[in-house]
Amino acid sequence: MKLLQTLVYLLFVSVSGGHTIGGVRRWKRIESCMDIKGPLGLLLSKKSAARQQERDMATAHLLQRASAFLSSNPSPLRSRSPLLYLRPKPPRSAMATDSSAAPFQKIQIQREDTTFDAHVVGKENAPGIVVLQEWWGVDYEIKNHAIHISQLGGGYRALIPDLYRGKVALDVAEAQHLMEGLDWQGAVKDIQASVKWLKSTGSPKVGVTGYCMGGALSIASGVIVPEVDAVVAFYGTPSSELADPSKAKAPIQAHFGEHDNFVGFSDVTAAKSLEEKLKSSGVPYEVHMYPGCSHAFMNTSPEALKRKKGMGLTDENQECVDLAWSRFSAWMGRFLGSA
């Protein structure tokens, strides 16, 4: 059968242009009728597998670069080396278009000589919580988190400052590009302006929370921004250049996954280092480790799970997610109260 199929294929190529796109399609139809895979099908499957392997290698490489970048000194003056394997495309200016956008009020906040957008959800005059994005930008998942936070306890007013000024990464390369270009000190100023806006518009107390990049920034705000009343950080720690957690002024709770491999930023070693620094700060603190969980374990929407799997993060543990949210709620309720 294999010999017959090969002869048929060679004859097909010679008389019908089998190497053209149309020819390939016609041959695939013939193959399906013959109910055999054939040499062309085998060749195409091998090429597809090779391309997938290249994509997996590129993603792994970018994640390693992200880990190295985040564990170093984030600074707007830091030189950026070119990415290997994948060349980052210019970031696209696109906001999330999912249904979670509906409850939000879009506002503008002024700080110094610049203005930035922010998205607010929740009851007026409720305690406020500034919600800080991951390296993707203000996308569907950070909005999902903000909506959930606004509904915890007696209710909170959640505000997402747009640290990327409207840009949202659609793949790992763009996310890396945007994060490396972030003015981290400027981002802390955005956070401070957001906290002040919430307090000036009715929130008696304001906390800060964040995820990944936002987790690091939330801890930094607990050190640098005196108006912050409480912090909950997820899988992220600031560099020593940005902020020293041993000098924290606000109570800090932090959450990490046991299998997080962002070395020096959110792995077990980074979590233990943070805990030691918080011990010497004198502020109330908690550092929680979640067995079996990797980076970004709080992201549970179908879209987020698909994106995580594309990055090699395959764990799903709703029990840990629920436990983290309960600890979050207790911490913010303790230091902010609720509406």
Image (cartoon, helix red, strand yellow):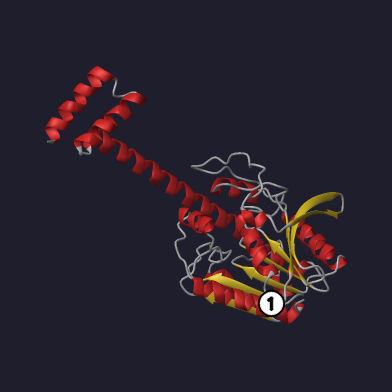
Question: In the picture provided, is 307 more to the left or to the right than 254?
Answer: left
Total numbered labels placed on residues in the image: 1
Tell me residue 34's x, y (percent): 19, 35
The quadrant of the rendering that contains the N terminus is top left
* Residue at figure coordinates x 78%, y 57% from the top left: 190
* Residue identified by numbered label 1: 153
Q: Is residue 152 visible?
A: yes
* Residue at figure coordinates x 52%, y 50% from the top left: 62
Amino acid, disc 1: Gly
The quadrant of the rendering that contains the C terminus is bottom right
Q: Is residue 283 visible?
A: no
Question: In the picture provided, is 234 more to the left or to the right than 64?
Answer: right
Tell me residue 94's x, y (percent): 66, 44
Could you say which is closer to the camera, residue 63 or residue 8?
8
Tell me residue 326's x, y (percent): 61, 78
Q: Quadrant location of residue 45?
A: top left
Position above or below: 301 against 95: below
Position above or below: 311 against 254: above
Could you say which is closer to the camera, residue 31 or residue 10?
31
Mark 1 residue element: loop
* Neighbourhood count class around disc 1 (C-alpha, 10 Å): few under 14, some 14–19, many 20 upward: some
* Residue at figure coordinates x 67%, y 64% from the top left: 147
* Residue at figure coordinates x 60%, y 55% from the top left: 69
Tell me residue 303's x, y (percent): 53, 55
Could you say which is closer to the camera, residue 167 or residue 107?
107
Question: In the picture provided, is 63 more to the left or to the right than 40?
Answer: right
